[in-house]
Image (tube, rainbow, N blue to C red):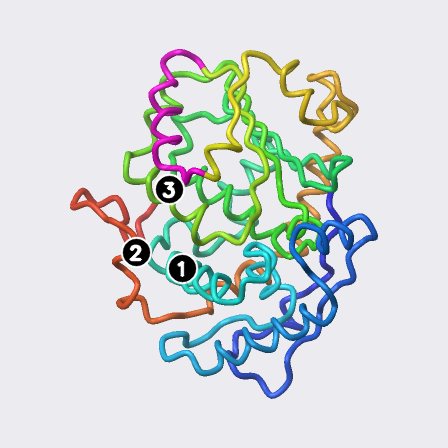
Amino acid sequence: MASGSGVTATALSVDKCPSRYEANDISPPELHRTIALQKLGETDVRRVESLRLLREWIATHPHIRRCRTDALFLLRFLRARAYDVQAAQTTLVRYLTMRQLFRIWYENLDPSDRYMRELVENVRGCLPLGLDRSGRMVALVKVRCYDVARFNCYHLGRLQHMLFEAFFDDVELQIAGGVAIIDCDGATMGHFVCFKLSDIRNFMDCLVHALPVRVKEVHIVRLPRFGQALGNLVLSFAAEELRKRIFFHASMDEVLKYVDQDLLPVEYGGKSCPEEITDSLKRRLADKRDTLLLLDRMEIEVEPYAHLWRQSDEGDVEFGMEID
């Protein structure tokens, strides 16, 4: 798995104008320094100057009330937007708004929550496999593992975002991006009807415009015929640049043209042990728990930006909704 950032919540603050900024920037490995320079135009001078500009903008922003300003957090947005500072600012505003507007997805991402703990420890439907030869973070989602009679779309969405946040501070992911493999073998109709149309639309919009992640490839494998309508919907809501990175495959053999086989679990012919991946993930989440919960203390005035997401009158987003 990608190395952790080593940042603890006790060293972090959501004061948007602190007396001293947390200098928790981590020097990337050589491979990622090269990628950062070639793909993002990142240099030491540009990184420092961009952080200064972003911090000054946050400190004087009329609607941002509280926000992390440490280097690793802000570099998520700068690297996701290839050091276009204005684009990074826009993404950060959307990210802060998104977290409050869709609280059922993004707040209280607590790994000790009974559902999150069960999904990580027992279900094992989402496995972070580690870095490939190109330095990208690879994750495997096994759709069949999720019991839709027990877990609804909000449980699954919260799990996904908890895992996102647990890895967002990793410099390797920030620089080289991520690859997702979604194995739909054994998926049922229930897996494809548990998401509302507005959920899919809003999630895709968040993924493209608000989440600070560089999606390099998404490989959807063995999508059943009854799931193709959902697949077409996902594509219709995705931005053109993301659509180019979504691939559909009839078998895992086709995925091996893109992904190192050794990274895959042994059941796929690889060398990874799901139990070891799960144990490592549990430790990471335990270490990150305070940092994950600290995110809830960030705050932005939502009203000026609520129009960025369309909400129906069907109660798609219910504040404080009970999902037990």
Instruction: Give me the C-alpha separation between circle 1 and circle 2.
Output: 8 Å
Work out whether mark 1 precedes mark 2 in sequence or the reverse, and give the earlier one. 1
- Point out residue 316 in the picture as x, y percentages from the top left corner: 25, 44
Q: Identify the residue shown where x is 54% and y is 36%.
A: 119
* Depicted 59 relative to depicted 253: above or below: below
Q: Which residue is mark 1?
A: 94
Q: Is residue 84 magenta?
A: no
Residues marked 1 and 2 touching at CB (< 8 Å): yes
Taking the spot 51% from the left edge, 62% from the top edge, the residue there is: 88
Position of residue 126 relative to residue 211, above or below, is above
Q: Which mark is residue 121?
A: none
> Measured from the top left, where is residue 201 in percent x and y?
33, 40
User: 178 or 106, which lies in front?
Assistant: 178
The residue that disc 2 covers is 308
The amino acid sitting under disc 3 is Asp
Residue 324 is tagged as 3
Element on which disc 3 rests:
loop
Local secondary structure at mark 1? helix
Local SS, label 2: helix
Sequence-wise first label, 1 or 3:
1
**Which comes sooner in the sequence, label 2 or label 3?**
2
Magenta segment: does it hold 226? yes
The stretch in magenta equals: 224-240
Image quarter in which the C terminus is found: top left
Type of amino acid under label 2: Leu
Query: Separation of disc 2 and disc 3 at Cα?
Result: 29 Å
From the image, state whether disc 2 or disc 3 is nearer to you. Answer: 2
Q: Residue furthest bottom?
A: 19
